[in-house]
Amino acid sequence: MQSFIVKDGYGIIAACLAAAVILTSFGEPSWGTPFFALSLFMLFFFRNPARALPKDDKAVFSPADGTVMDIADFIDHEYLDAEAKKITVFLSVFDVHVNRSPVRGEIKYQSYTCGRFRPAYKSIASFENERHAIGIENEKIKILVIQIAGILARRIVSWVTLGHDLKQGQRYGMIKFGSSTELIVPQNVRILVKKGDKVKGGVTVMGRIEE
């Protein structure tokens, strides 16, 4: 059964609760209040809502919850090696931070790059910040999804590896505390979202494959 809380949050939540209990028990009751509040926020941040897995081979779903920051045409030399379209989604600390696979397919490419921790909403973060990229491919399409760390998000978590088969909408990782996610698709994908749109991972259709 799926846990309501991402397993990576268990230790942080437990530490906050332990600090709250210790400070309340051995000090002033008010000393523990900030840690109780922090533990509630951590419960909220590490939430892992249940969502039905989509089944639409022509649809490319959002890999994350958040706000569309930018949509751009460019040439991808990392995985697609072709003209492509890039959709950047910014995740605030109030968004669900679990990443989901936009399409079904096998992970044919994986790369982790160490870097800086600039604010995730700045365009320069795409080039300078710590990032984790996976290339997913099936018989219809190949895409690249990039998790980018932000000023607070200093750890990118991946639960999959090279050769892993992903279902459409399947959870594959998360970024802790504010971040951005890039979705790179080929030119034959018709983009259905615009800058400023709110999107949900595994729910919002970002684009459709055109034959």
Image (cartoon, grey):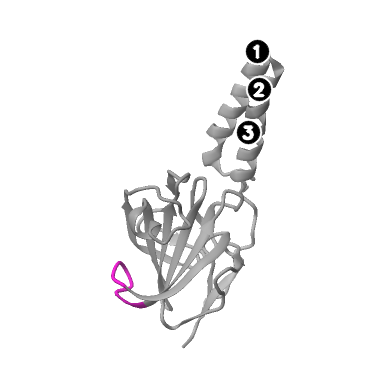
Judging depth in this view, the residue of 203 and 163 nearest the camera is 203
Q: Are marks 1 and 2 in contact (CB under 8 Å)?
A: yes
Q: Residue furthest bottom?
A: 211
Q: Residue at x 55, y 39 (%)?
A: 9
Q: CA distance from mark 3 to mark 2?
A: 11 Å
When asked about the image quadrant of residue 3, the answer is top right
Q: Is residue 202 magenta?
A: no
Q: Which residue is mark 1?
A: 27
Judging depth in this view, the residue of 85 and 120 nearest the camera is 120
Q: Which residue is mark 3?
A: 39
Q: What amino acid is found at the position of numbered circle 3 in the picture? A: Ser
Judging depth in this view, the residue of 91 and 151 nearest the camera is 151
Q: Residue at x 60, y 65 (%)?
A: 199
Q: Can residue 168 be seen at all in this image of the molecule?
A: no
Q: CA distance from mark 1 to mark 3?
A: 19 Å
Residue 115 image position (x, y, % from top left): 32, 49
* Magenta part of the chain: 76-83
Q: What amino acid is found at the position of numbered circle 2 in the picture? A: Gly
Chief SS of the magenta region? loop
Find residue 32 and name its label: 2
Q: Indicate the secondary structure of the residue bearing disc 3.
A: helix
Find residue 191 and name its label: none
Q: Is residue 82 magenta?
A: yes
Q: What amino acid is found at the position of numbered circle 1 in the picture? A: Gly
When asked about the image quadrant of residue 187, the answer is bottom left
